[in-house]
Every structure is written in structure tokens, then in C-alpha cells.
Amino acid sequence: MKILILQPFIPHYREEFFELLNSKKTLDVFCYEKSAKMESNNFKKSSFKTSYLSNLSLGPFLFYNFFKLFNKKHDLLVLMLHFGHISTWILLLTKKIHGKKIILWGQGISVKRYMVEEITPSRLLKWMIYFSDGVWFYTDKELEQWKRIFPKKKMISLNNTISDIEAIVTRSKVLNKEELKTKHNIHQEKCFIFCARFTHPHRRVDLLLSAIDSLDDEKFAFIIIGDGNFKPDFSRYKNVYDFGAVYDLELKSELFNIADIYFQPGWVGLSIVEAMAYGKPIFTFKRSEDILQCVEYHYIKNGVNGYIFDSLTSFLNTVTSLSSTKVTELGENSKKYVIDVLTMNNMVKSAFTNIVEVQTNNK
């Protein structure tokens, strides 16, 4: 029997997950967003084969054509853990009629309401999880929270990661930093790198600009990778090296190898996984009502593989006094965390194990 998975679209950084899982358990993947919308949000499309699922949406609510999911060759559906998906509610509430098992896949918490929901979890998500047969969460932190509520539910953490993560770990060992700095005309002693899409204000670019303005432009450089509607004009800074959107792996490898530290003030997500694979410590600011952070923020261990700052002042005091030895130590810990926890093989193994448990559970 095949597994059916529903997603909005498959970006390039998720491609390997579906390819490896498909090699273990044959998949049919349906997507409800068209390529044009994905490209407008600065995503690169995966080449993994998918089918389009017609739908209607209004704000956060989505009604997709769930009748297409009733194919007899699918005994298990992997749907999204999103309370706005009306069709998913219908499928959950009619399981005894259609007879298919349902795994829900999602963060398990709202990034924008994180500080509230980590204390009082969403009631709507609670009901979705209750009616499901299993759940895939992105990180251990959300899994632990929901395990306290549903200790017997078949739930796992995927430890969300990106395609080709093992190759990035290997690639980061073979390039000479000083030669690369000369190639790209970067002369500053310490170099930060920022690699994310400028598609909303939650990246807190204002704090990035404040950091650039406050640091000596002869000692500190900033490499910028990414485009988007909220991207500021960096041309007035002589110590900012703006490369725009970069999908060329050779160039990206060079830029990450030049950098000493990955710095993203807010909304850190999967971009930090890539940076950690390159052996970069992660610098960001503490989650608050004003500074939102995605669930991958949990991967940052303060003082171990990066620093989480309370203020711009504490950031500036640290970076101006931090030794190269400490930066190297933090970076090595970042890479070790990726090797130990965030490989794609581990992510696929967790998903496959849960699929088998759900399919063999007759309760």
C-alpha cells in the first residue's frame, strides 16, 4: 500500500526527505499551492514528482478536494497539523467511514503565539491530535510538550533538517578561508553571514542594520545571502557584501567558509541548520513578544553552539571581545550537533518508524 502526503509545495531543501522516504515506502505527494506562488515567495522548487490538489482558501482557512484522497491504494494519509484546514477536520472526524489512518505533520505550536502556547497549548490542535493516529513534530521541544498531554499517542520528532546536509558537513572541510577572502575582496578580520529570505519583517532587519552601524567597518564584515520585498539597501555600507539569492552550491560554500559566525536577529529557522553544518556558531536574540523565533531556535544551546542575546548592547560587548578560539569551539559544537541529531537519514528513519507503528496499530 502507498502512503499519501499532503503539503503546500515541495521546496528544494525538502526534496531529499521525500526521495529517501519514497525509497522505503512508496509515496504519492499532493500539493495545494501552485508554482507561481512558491516562486513569488523566493522558494526554489523541488524536482520531486507531485500532483496538484484543487482547493479554495480564505485567510487561514483551506478547503481542499479531499475526495481525491479516497484512492484504495492509500491506507495512510499524512496531512498537515493546521487547524485552518477544514478538509482535514472532515477526514479526521470520518475515519470510521473511510477507514484510513491519519498522521498529522507540523510544528505543533504557533510561532507568532509561541510564548502563550508553550504554556497553554492550542485547543484546536489538541482536538486534531486527539483524533489522529500519529503526529510528526519538527523538534523535540514540541514533542515533549504534547507527550505530557497524550502520553500514549504515537508521536515523534523529525528533528527538522535540510537536503544534502551530510554533503555540506563534508564540503565545509576542504576550502581555505584566506584564499576565499582574497577572491571575494573581503579584508575584515571577523565576518558574519546572514542567509535567509527577506519576505517579512520578523527577521528583524532593523537589528541587523543596528549591528552593522555599531561595529567597526574595518574589523567586521557582513555577508548577505537572500532577497525579498523587505530587503534593505546595503549599498551604503563598505563592509557589507551582498550576494542576493544564491543557489549555486560552490559559491554558497565559499561564502560560508569565509564567515566566522552566523548572525540572524529574529525568525531563525532551517537556515541555521545549514549554517551549523558549515561549522558556524549561531548568534541571535532571545525570543520575546517583539522578537519571534521559529521552532528550530531550540537547536541553539546558549554558550555551547552559539549565543542568544538579551539586547544589542550584550551582542556588541560579546562580539568585540570574543576570542577566535571560542568562536572555533562554538562552531565545532554546531557541526557536531548536526552530525549527531540533524542528518537527513535520522529524519527519514523517524518518519518511517512512525509510519510502521501507526500502520500496525489496530487500536
Image (cartoon, helix red, strand yellow):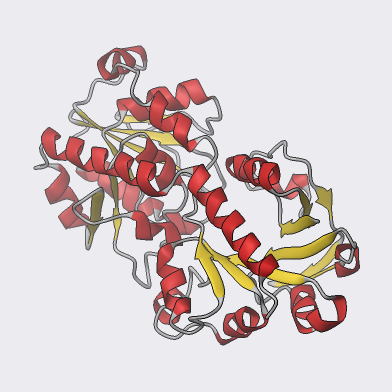
| Nearer to me, 62 or 351 | 351
Quadrant including the N terminus? bottom right
Residue 142 is drawn in which quadrant? bottom left
With respect to residue 323, does 255 lie above or below? Answer: above
Residue at the image position 41 percent from the left and 78 percent from the top = 118
Q: Left or right of 127: which side holds 261?
A: left
How many marks the image carries: the answer is: 0
Query: In the rendered image, is residue 262 in sight?
Result: no
Query: Residue 218: x percent and y percent?
Result: 19, 28
With respect to residue 360, does 123 lie above or below? Answer: below
Query: Residue 140: x percent and y percent?
Result: 42, 64
Q: Left or right of 135: which side holds 160?
A: left
Residue at the image position 68 percent from the left and 41 percent from the top = 23
Query: In the rendered image, is residue 46 in sight?
Result: yes
Residue at the image position 59 percent from the left and 62 percent from the top = 354
| Nearer to me, 325 or 77 | 77
Query: Residue 162: x percent and y percent?
Result: 52, 43
| Nearer to me, 100 or 338 | 100
Query: Residue 350: x percent and y percent?
Result: 53, 56
Residue at the image position 33 percent from the left and 46 percent from the top = 337
